[in-house]
Image (spheres, rainbow, N blue to C red):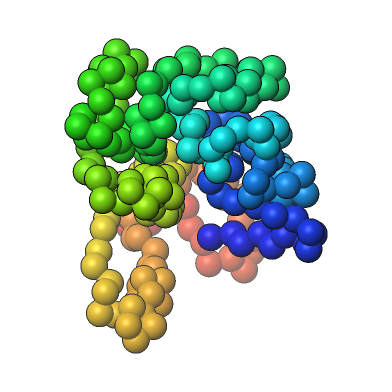
Amino acid sequence: MNVVEIQNAKATLDGGDVLFTGKEIFVGVGKRTNEAGAQAVAEAFPEYAVSKVNFSHCEALHLKDVFNMAGKNVMAVAPGPDVQGVLRQMQDVADYPYHVMQMDSRLGTDMLYTNGHLVHHVRQEMGDKSYGMLDQFIEPEIQRVEVNMNQLSFEGRGISGLALLILKMETYLDTLDEKILGPRHHIQMTELAKVGGTISSLAILIARTSKPKRIVSNIQDEDLGYFTMWKRSDQIH
């Protein structure tokens, strides 16, 4: 895991103001995040386009209180004229188009899309209309996980604020599947690893022996010197 430290002491940055769409990053500059904090995000992720949006006039505390990804190109948006103003900013600076899934409450917008899974509230918490929007917009191949957040929602805790995303080991295995085309063998090294044992230190590579092959030569008798011990194979009896 790479850790990037913010060098500007005046920078303020809240993770709830950083929205990653899978293609680009939006940073809401408002109550918890300032311009320097948004610049720090851009410096930490130079491989992605990072766009700042003015979030200071929005009633919500965090950008992800009212905006969240619900699929590869689907963005869930909370209601309200202040939110619509921020949405127009995002549409103006975005490098990619997104389908807007307009929800009827902030609670309905609270969701987390990752690794082909969408974690969202149960119908009783979202309401029938917002829940129906999921049925309409979410592709069938996306696996939906419903969670009951009734008690935590009273404390203002959203799904994205209670999740810590980490890199899955399967990511490295996928790389092996892509790069290594030959046969692979999996072995269990749990106990040996405790004493520092590694696969390479426990293996001795030896050359494979093959059957000798007849070498065809056009050497003649006159090519052989007076003191040579060689003889043509067809003269050996």
Q: What residue is at 35 percent from the left and 60 percent from the top? A: 208
**Residue sitting at x 49%, y 32%:** 66
Q: Is residue 17 left or right of residue 41?
A: left
Q: Quadrant of residue 12?
A: bottom right
The residue located at (39%, 68%) in the rendering is: 205
Horizontal side of residue 13 vs 202, given as left or right:
right
- Relative to 15, 10 lies left or right: right
* Location of residue 189 with respect to 163 vertically, above or below: below
Of 58 and 185, nearer the camera is: 58
The image shows residue 236 at horizontal and vertical percentages of 38, 56
Q: Indicate the position of residue 119 as horizontal and vertical percent values.
A: 31, 38
Q: Residue at x 33, y 78 (%)?
A: 193
Q: Quadrant of the C terminus?
A: bottom left
Image quarter of residue 20? top right
Horizontal and vertical percent position of residue 184: 30, 51
Image spot of residue 73 (x, y percent): 47, 21
